Amino acid sequence: MSAKVWLVGAGPGDPELLTLKAVRALREADVVLIDDLVNTAVLEHCPNARVIPVGKRGGCRSTPQAFIHRLMLRYVRQGKCVVRLKGGDPCIFGRGGEEADWLRARDVEVELVNGITAGLAGATQCGISLTLRGISRGVTLVTAHTQDDSSLNWQALAQTGTTLVVYMGVAKLAEIRDSLLAGGLAAQTPVAMIENASLPQQRECRSSLADMQLDAATFQLKSPAILVIGAVAAFDQAEMTDWLQTQGSAG
Ligand code: SAH
């Protein structure tokens, strides 16, 4: 196989949510650099590859990004097929674009492979339809965590009327609540907090904007988790079926 780097999304955790293309990349891999949120069960597709954990919890205590770049470059220049395996989708809060640019600037062939991002998977696995007809006309994916500590415009987000899906929010629940309340979002806005989405240990906690921080503490919500904020978060599968029946099939 020719030397190249595949930047691959491994999906949210359930190994069956891998794409066929991700499986093909893994089969071709000589070296796999794996992030900490990736379920290692997916490595069954690359039994002969050298696997290097590069995630914060993967044994390498926060591998610096520059080191990961150099590792990829070193192996691909040795003629190896390198798979950089990331949780969810490589380009949703995953630095996939950055890594692709860096490699392409050094004349490395790069291929990006989509994965199912945790925010979408978490909602669907709980029976929440993020764009439930008649309730939500859009979804906004945001991260509560920024490298430079710059703040999101939560006020603007509170006004969009779309469903909010928040990544990396577990440690910032009070801040998110206060900002959205200040931005005008109703205290009773439904919230679903979904931990370990798509894995056997998935847990979900339904709450409201006003109560989410206290409820999460009682529930002992832990990372990785996503938050779904908006009217759709009150619906489970049964309620959604009822709602759709009242709406008829038009629209
Ligand atoms: N590229 C990834 C996101 C990486 S950022 C993707 O597309 O999914 C890491 C954050 O993703 C976590 O803090 C958490 O908010 C979310 N996350 C990743 N895996 C998750 C899972 N199985 N369940 C819930 N949230 C998850």
Image: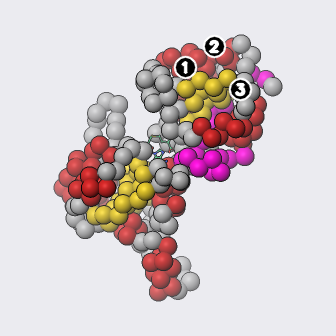
Q: Residue at x 22, y 49 (%)?
A: 174
Q: Is residue 83 left or right of residue 236?
A: right
In this orientation, which residue lies closer to the viewer: 200 or 50? 200
Three-letter code, disc 1: His
Please check the rendered image and state whether residue 71 is part of the magenta-colored stretch, yes or no: no
User: What is the crowding at mark 3: few (fewer than 14 residues within 10 Å), some, or many (at least 20)?
Assistant: some
* Residue drawn at (60%, 26%) of the image: 33
Residues at marks 1 and 3, CA–CA distance in whole angstroms: 19 Å
* Three-letter code for the amino acid on which mark 3 is drawn: Ala
User: Label 3's element?
Assistant: loop
The residues colored magenta run: 2-20
Q: CA distance from mark 1 to mark 2?
A: 9 Å
Q: Position of residue 131 (x, y in %)?
A: 48, 65
Q: Residue at x 35, y 31 (%)?
A: 147
Dividing the picture into quadrants, the one containing residue 190 is bottom left
List the residue tagged with mark 3: 49
Report the residue marked by disc 1: 69
Report if residue 156 is visible in the image. Answer: no
Q: Is residue 240 left or right of residue 231?
A: right
Colour mapping: secondary structure
Quadrant where the C terminus lies?
bottom right
Residue 227, how many percent across, how many down? 38, 54
Residue indicated by mark 2: 74
x, y percentage for residue 237? Answer: 49, 73
Secondary structure under badge 2?
A: helix
Seen from the viewer's position, the closer of residues 56 and 118 is: 56
Dot in front, 1 or 3:
3
Please tell me whether residue 104 is drawn above or below residue 159 in the rendered image: above
Q: Residue at x 43, y 56 (%)?
A: 203
